[in-house]
């Protein structure tokens, strides 16, 4: 049984579950309903002058994030097939609002203070936060629709690339030390951009040839920053140097072929390309997640195949219980994702109750998710 009650902010304690959303003046959610409060969030409520909030406790709280509360409204045949076939997604990386805030502030500090004595320590703290988020949930997947730690592109991009790269590395069987090192490299892969002139870095339009030549120096500049810091291994520095190299030798700054590119960089490259595709910039529109995944799948000459396959097996494009629209005109509920077919989950039609195994059933070959 759920017990819901009001608590003055001054009396809140860590571990309490907030039973309301806290939003700012622009209606942006600062703390989502159902979040477990920690010291950072409580302090934030106090600083914002929030007098008190509703909290809840009880056995049903644990179930509140399971989006099955509308299943009773489905037609019987639909409900039967959904309940029969529903297979929970692999555990996903989850970052609490306080961790997102801490990580965002940490990465902004790093990019603004590349020469500080606390550089390595701050990098380590951020990566440990990400490692903890992965290990606490035994996460083997990332919901690519929810990645976002900051509205600032460089910082968001760095953390997203680090998170995706760590999951890819974990699924490839890398040791915890390697997963950690790849996380560090992901966070710092664009560190050289802190040395690029702001008029180029923030240009609202496309860069001309000369400007792009300067921008491409960020890989080398980032490498030089890290090489001066003895706390980072050569593998981390090389990954930063090579994250824009391509398997066919068409990348930069060295034009390396596949056998000369460090494994860390091969993983970073896949995550980096994907996140850049789905992010809107002043000079380009963002691609949909589906289109970006399809583009990644087409880049077999440029991206490492093993890293690409691990990426495709690590991302969740259509989470179980989400509703999608099919090309046959029917709406459907996702009931199972296949690790080898990120674009083609098994779904149940919400009108007909038909089961569409988009990955394995040849009779569904002409049906797409729109």
Image (cartoon, rainbow, N blue to C red):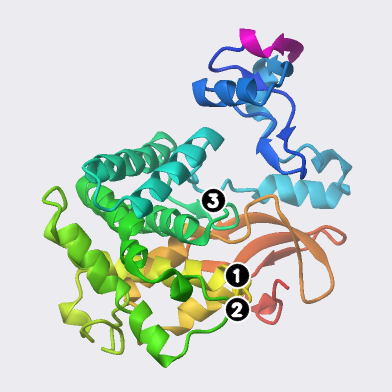
Above/below status of 225 relative to 276: above
Q: Residues within 10 Å of mark 1 (few under 14, many from 20)?
A: few
Q: Earlier in the sequence, mark 2 or mark 3?
A: 3
**What percent of the width, then of the height, locates residue 265?**
27, 68
Q: Is 299 colored magenta in this rendering?
A: no
Q: Which residue is mark 1?
A: 280
The quarter of the picture where the N terminus appears is top right
Residues in magenta? 1-11
Q: Position of residue 28 (x, y in %)?
A: 72, 44
Indicate the position of residue 284 as horizontal and vertical percent values: 60, 78
Question: Circles 2 and 3: CB distance less than 8 Å?
Answer: no
Between 90 and 290, the one lying in front of the other is 290
Q: Are marks 2 and 1 in contact (CB under 8 Å)?
A: yes
Q: For mark 2, does the 10 Å Cα neighbourhood hold few (<14), some (14 to 19), or many (20 or more) residues?
A: few
Q: What is the spatial separation of the Cα atoms under label 2 and label 3, in whole angstroms?
A: 19 Å
| Residue 325 in the figure: left or right of residue 221 | right
Residue at 34% from the left image edge and 81% from the top image edge? 214
Residue 242 pos. (x, y %): 25, 73
Q: Label 3, on which residue? A: 150
Q: Residue tagged by mark 2?
A: 284
Rendered image: mark on residue 1: none
Element at badge 3? Answer: loop
């Amino acid at each position: 049984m759920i017990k819901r009650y009001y608590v003055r902010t001054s009396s809140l304690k860590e571990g309490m579950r907030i039973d309301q959303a806290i939003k700012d003046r622009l209606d942006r959610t600062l703390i989502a309903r159902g979040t477990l409060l920690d010291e950072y969030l409580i302090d934030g409520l106090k600083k914002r002058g929030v007098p008190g909030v509703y909290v809840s406790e009880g056995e049903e709280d644990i179930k509140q994030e399971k989006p099955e509360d509308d299943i009773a409204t489905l037609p019987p045949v639909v409900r039967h097939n959904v309940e029969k076939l529903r297979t929970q997604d692999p555990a996903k990386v989850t970052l609490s609002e306080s961790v997102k805030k801490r990580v965002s502030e940490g990465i902004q500090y790093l990019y603004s203070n590349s020469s500080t004595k606390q550089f390595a320590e701050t990098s380590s703290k951020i990566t440990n936060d990400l490692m903890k988020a992965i290990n606490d949930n035994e996460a083997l997947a990332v919901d690519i629709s929810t990645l976002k730690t900051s509205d600032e592109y460089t910082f968001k991009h760095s953390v997203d690339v680090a998170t995706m790269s760590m999951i890819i590395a974990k699924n490839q069987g890398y040791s915890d030390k390697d997963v950690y090192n790849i996380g560090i490299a992901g966070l710092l892969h664009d560190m050289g951009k802190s040395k690029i002139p702001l008029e180029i870095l923030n240009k609202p339009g496309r860069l001309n040839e000369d400007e792009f030549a300067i921008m491409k120096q960020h890989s080398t500049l980032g490498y030089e920053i890290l090489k001066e810091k003895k706390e980072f291994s050569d593998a981390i520095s090389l990954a930063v140097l090579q994250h824009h190299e391509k398997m066919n030798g068409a990348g930069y700054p060295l034009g390396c072929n596949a056998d000369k590119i460090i494994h860390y960089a091969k993983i970073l490259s896949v995550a980096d390309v994907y996140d850049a595709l789905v992010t809107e910039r002043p000079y380009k529109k963002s691609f949909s997640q589906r289109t970006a995944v399809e583009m990644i799948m087409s880049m077999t000459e440029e991206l490492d195949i093993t890293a690409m396959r691990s990426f495709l097996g690590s991302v969740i494009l259509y989470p179980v219980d989400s509703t999608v629209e099919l090309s046959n005109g029917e709406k459907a509920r996702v009931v199972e994702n296949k690790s080898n077919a990120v674009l083609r989950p098994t779904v149940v039609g919400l009108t007909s109750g038909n089961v569409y195994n988009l990955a394995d059933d040849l009779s569904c070959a002409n049906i797409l998710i729109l």
